[in-house]
Amino acid sequence: MKKILYACCAAVFFILMLSGCDKAEPLPDEWKELKYAADTFTLEDAKREGYVVMEDGDVTCGQEAWQNFVDLSSKKIPCKIRVVHYYTLGDPSDYDPEYYESIKDDYPMMFILEVDYNGETFRVGNYEGEKLYTSEFKYLMKYEGESETPTSTFTSYVRYVLVNDDKVTWNDIMHGVTSSKLEDYIPFREIYADLVYKEGYK
């Protein structure tokens, strides 16, 4: 149940992050192929094409491709990669019936991100319908840690997050997300996560 709730929250959070992205009108030539993938690809297509796949907040495919992207970008070598974020609802019996009915038609959700590194900055883009959302960041940060809450479904994590300040921590980012003060928010995009789950949760 907790894992499913996390997936729902993560999907909603992903959508909210788009509100801070730049919006461009449809189909610049360099993004046309991404638009095609976003409109036509299934989860199986993405895996078959070698995309990095995140299912309900955790990587399930493409770990080697991701590490190659990390290695190249750390050497300031231009490179790009596609990362799928896929969210499901799971067992309907885990939800209040009325709430489940209100959200079931929105799932599964799938977002295809293209992350392009030009040797200096990272640009990430994804399509929502006919609109392309893009944002740029200076740094790809790796955050590792142990779960700090006893109710968490996982014991440890590795996260790769795009930010504009290489001094910020994951705790700084989470503080900004939960704070009621707008000035505490730190722009970021979480791209990749590898979670170690507690026994019985995966």
Image (cartoon, rainbow, N blue to C red):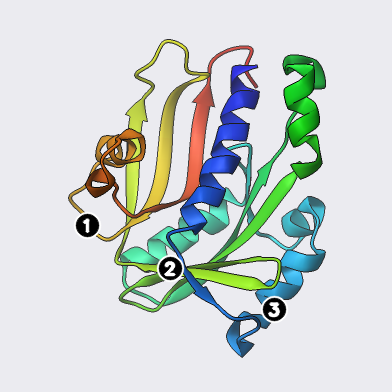
Which tag is nearer the camera, tag 3 or tag 2?
Answer: 2
> In the displayed structure, would residue 63 be above or below residue 46?
above
Q: In the image, is residue 70 above or below residue 108?
A: below
Residue hosting label 3: 33
Q: Is residue 116 above or below residue 108?
A: below
Q: Give coordinates of residue 134: x percent, y percent.
A: 49, 70
Mark carried by residue 165: 1
Q: Please indicate whether residue 31 sits to the left or right of residue 117 in the image.
A: right
- In the rendered image, residue 192, in percent from the top left (x then y), is placed at 49, 48
The answer to whether residue 49 is left or right of residue 194 is right
Q: Which mark is residue 135?
A: 2
Q: Is residue 193 left or right of residue 139?
A: right
Across and down, in percent, residue 179 comes to: 29, 35
Dot 3 or dot 2: first in sequence order is 3
Q: Quadrant of the N terminus?
A: top right
Which quarter of the picture shows residue 73? bottom left
Front in this rendered view, residue 39 or 66: 39
Which amino acid type is shown beneath numbered disc 2?
Ser
**Would you say the residues marked 3 and 1 are in contact, meaning their CB atoms lie under 8 Å apart?**
no
